[in-house]
């Protein structure tokens, strides 16, 4: 099952002056832990969330992340870096009803976190909602409608899960 790389830094850049340069960056760093390194299993039973400990039970591979807001001066140097969230829990991958029962109602809400200064963040797996027909994209004969027609042709990725980094931030933070 896929997760974000601990050796990568994921960044959402914001240009709020229209000059094509980054004014604000939201940086994400992940840390993956394995509860039982002797096991190859992703889960060791049905995954549940324990609100008293703030952890997912029976999840052998867990991922947490930090979010930092970095602001830049006009010359591109860092003006300030503020940690908005530390050690935030990602939900498990939605691997199926036996391993991750009640995924949407029980396992996703605990992975939506408030941020210092306002807003919320979610980093984890979601069902793809964008309609695109990859076969048509790469088949030049059928390029006439590259994004497809949601009502006429089924999306080739519509039933797939994607890793999502979602930020909801107040406009004052932009």
Image: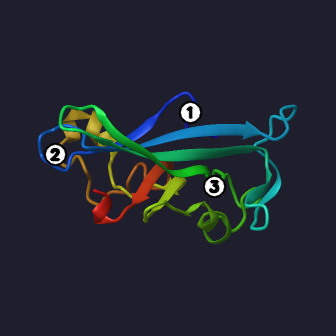
Tag nearer the camera, 1 or 2: 1
C-alpha separation, residue under disc 1 versus residue under disc 3: 15 Å
Foreground: 106 or 143?
106
Which one is earlier in the sequence, the residue at label 1 or at label 3? Answer: 1
Within 10 Å of disc 3 (Cα), the crowding (few <14, some 14-19, many 20+) is many
x, y percent for residue 42 = 75, 43
> SS for tag 3?
loop
C-alpha separation, residue under disc 3 versus residue under disc 2: 39 Å
Instruction: Indicate left or right for 43 with 171 as reference.
Output: right
Tell me if residue 161 can be seen: yes
Foreground: 154 or 15?
15
Is mark 3 in CB contact (under 8 Å) with mark 2? no
Q: Residue at x 73, y 38 (%)?
A: 33
Q: Which residue is label 1 attached to?
A: 5
Instruction: Indicate left or right for 162 with 103 as reference.
Output: left
Q: What colour-coding does the image apply? A: rainbow
x, y percent for residue 85 = 54, 53
In this picture, is 127 found above or below 162? Answer: below
Quarter of the image where one finds residue 141: top left
Q: Which residue is label 2 attached to?
A: 144
> SS for tag 1?
loop
In this picture, is 32 found above or below 154? Answer: above
x, y percent for residue 100 = 72, 59
C-alpha separation, residue under disc 1 versus residue under disc 2: 36 Å
Tell me if residue 151 can be seen: no
Q: What numbered label is drawn on residue 31? A: none
Q: Which residue is label 3 attached to?
A: 91
């Amino acid at each position: 099952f896929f997760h974000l790389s601990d050796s990568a830094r994921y960044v959402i850049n914001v240009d709020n002056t229209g000059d094509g340069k980054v004014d604000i960056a939201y940086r994400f760093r992940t840390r993956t832990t394995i509860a039982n390194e002797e096991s190859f299993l992703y889960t060791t039973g049905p995954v549940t969330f324990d609100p008293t400990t703030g952890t997912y039970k029976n999840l052998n591979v867990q991922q947490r992340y930090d979010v930092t807001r970095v602001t830049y001066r006009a010359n591109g140097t860092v003006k300030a870096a503020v940690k908005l969230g530390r050690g935030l829990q990602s939900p498990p991958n939605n691997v199926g009803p036996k391993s991750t029962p009640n995924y949407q109602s029980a396992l996703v809400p605990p992975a939506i976190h408030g941020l210092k200064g306002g807003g919320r963040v979610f980093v984890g797996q979601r069902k793809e909602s964008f309609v695109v027909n990859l076969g048509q994209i790469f088949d030049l004969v059928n390029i006439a409608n590259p994004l497809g027609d949601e009502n006429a042709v089924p999306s080739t990725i519509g039933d797939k899960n994607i890793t999502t980094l979602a930020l909801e931030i107040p406009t004052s933070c932009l």
